[in-house]
Amino acid sequence: MPSDLERQNRANPRQRAQRAATREKLIEGAVRIFAEKGYANATVDDVLREAGVSRASFYAHFPSKVALISAVADTFVPLWQPMYEELAGMQAPDQVSLEVWCRRNVALYRQNETTCLILTQATAIEPDLYWKIAGFQNVLIDMLARKNAALAHLEADEAGRHRAAFALSQLDQACYFLTVRRSQQDPEAAIVAMAAQLLHFFENEMARGASL
């Protein structure tokens, strides 16, 4: 029996376009209904009604609600990944450059507030999604090690990876707090503090790397 991938490869361009459009409708419908009802309360049937897609079509794309929220998380990757590649590429970060970066990162969260809120809700109750998001953190740490020679030790230094994970978690939580909890307030003072925390991490880890 042919696999899903084999069937997709046999499809003509029109069929592939229709399949991609249906998948997009499901993801967009899920974001709307999860935002309205909350991830825990929303059902697959709610998503189907919102997206105008049949149950058979849903299961042709996603085996479960968890797989659907995982796809929602994937849509956020192309947005945050370039930001963190830029951060990892800073060879000599200072307070000012990190404030500029943090300001843009908070703006990114605010532009995608609904997705951030939904993913936070879902990771609290879906272990598979939690570990997927945690895996993104390892990708970021590897990026730091690869793009900055002074941080190359993070590739194999377990303690260093933990320190980096803590710093990245603090950054993510701060951005979430400024976006969801205080979305109407001026975040400037918090951005300055966030940049100072990042600078402390960079300076300490780069000093460690230089001493190895």
Image: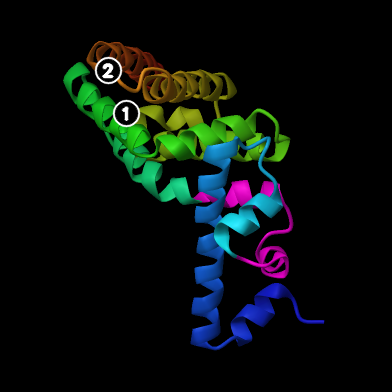
Q: Quadrant of residue 15?
A: bottom right
Compare residues 10 and 14 and report the one nearer the observer: 14
Spot occupied by residue 14 in the image (x, y as percentages of width and height): 50, 85
Residue at the spot x=30%, y=21% of the render? 184
Compare residues 21 and 200 and report the one nearer the observer: 21
Residue at the spot x=37%, y=13% of the render? 204
- Magenta-drawn stretch contains 206: no
Asked if residue 179 can be seen in this view, the reply is: yes
Contact check, label 2 and label 1, Cβ < 8 Å: yes
- Write down the region rendered in magenta: 53-74
Which kind of residue does numbered mark 2 sit on? Answer: Pro
Which of pointers 2 and 1 lies earlier in the amino acid sequence? 1
Compared to residue 205, the image places residue 116 above or below, namely below
Q: Which quarter of the figure is the C terminus placed in?
A: top left
Residue at the spot x=50%, y=40% of the render? 139
Estimate how packed mark 1 is, as few (under 14), some (14 to 19) or many (20 or more) residues with alpha carbons within 10 Å. many
- For this orientation, the residue located farthest to the left is 96
- For this orientation, the residue located farthest to the right is 1
Spot occupied by residue 134 in the image (x, y as percentages of width and height): 59, 33
- For this orientation, the residue located farthest to the front is 49
SS class of the residue under badge 2? loop
- Residue 152 horizontal side relative to residue 195, left or right: right
Q: Residue tagged by mark 1?
A: 106
SS class of the residue under badge 1? helix
Spot occupied by residue 195 in the image (x, y as percentages of width and height): 29, 17
Compared to residue 45, the image places residue 18 above or below, namely below
Residue 187 - label: 2
